[in-house]
Amino acid sequence: MADDLKERVLEASVELIAEAGLAGLSMREVARRAGVSHQAPYHYFEDKAAIVAALVERGFTRLAERLEEAAKKGTPQRKLERAGRSYITFALEEPVYFRLMFRPEWTDLSRFPAAEAAGARAFAVLHGLVNDLAAPRTGSARTEALVSMHWSLVHGLSTLLLDGPLARKLGDSEQRERHVDLVLRLFTDATSG
């Protein structure tokens, strides 16, 4: 029952953020939408920042699970491409989580070690995939740069498809898939060559 109440509070928070943005998030409105007393959310979350941190943790956990699944089989190139596609798909399917996860001004994650650990888990998958592809031919500094490049690539592409000009330019899913596949293939071909 307690887990159900906590889940209702988190679901209400996601709905509220989707509708009104983070500025519209209030403990009282979350409680109203969850159908609980205005004090009930405080049993699980100290404040709004704690709700945001819980959502960030959940987002990074979901992203990490997708990346880990993508990394299970195939060549290093195909694993990295699948992981990139998984990252982008996550952003498009879970925009509230995606937008919260990378906005440190919205909550200080150093106060929330579980959220930080979930972020580190997701990053470790990406790091490992790039390392598997590039490390045999490059030094560690170059590999670290390639990790940053790949992360920038998939994060930037996600943002452009979600909120930027590519959302309009690549309107249908078939166009979007072809474009994403080509961008990811170009990166892995250049990295592995």
Image (tube, rainbow, N blue to C red):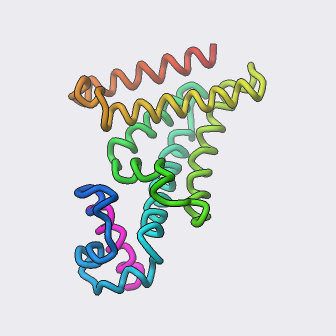
Asked whether 188 or 139 is in front, the reply is 139
Question: Which image quarter is the N terminus in?
Answer: bottom left
Asked whether 12 or 29 is in front, the reply is 29
Give the quadrant of residue 19. Answer: bottom left
Q: Is residue 190 left or right of residue 155?
A: right
Q: Residue, x 43% and y 34% (percent of image)?
A: 85
Residue farthest along the right direction in this orientation: 139
Q: Is residue 181 left or right of residue 172?
A: right
- Horizontal and vertical percent position of residue 84: 48, 33
Position above or below: 124 against 59: above
Report the predominant secondary structure element of the magenta stretch: helix
Position above or below: 13 against 162: below
- Horizontal and vertical percent position of residue 89: 38, 40
Q: Over which residues does the magenta segment extend?
A: 1-15
- Horizontal and vertical percent position of residue 59: 45, 55
Residue 168 forms part of the magenta stretch = no
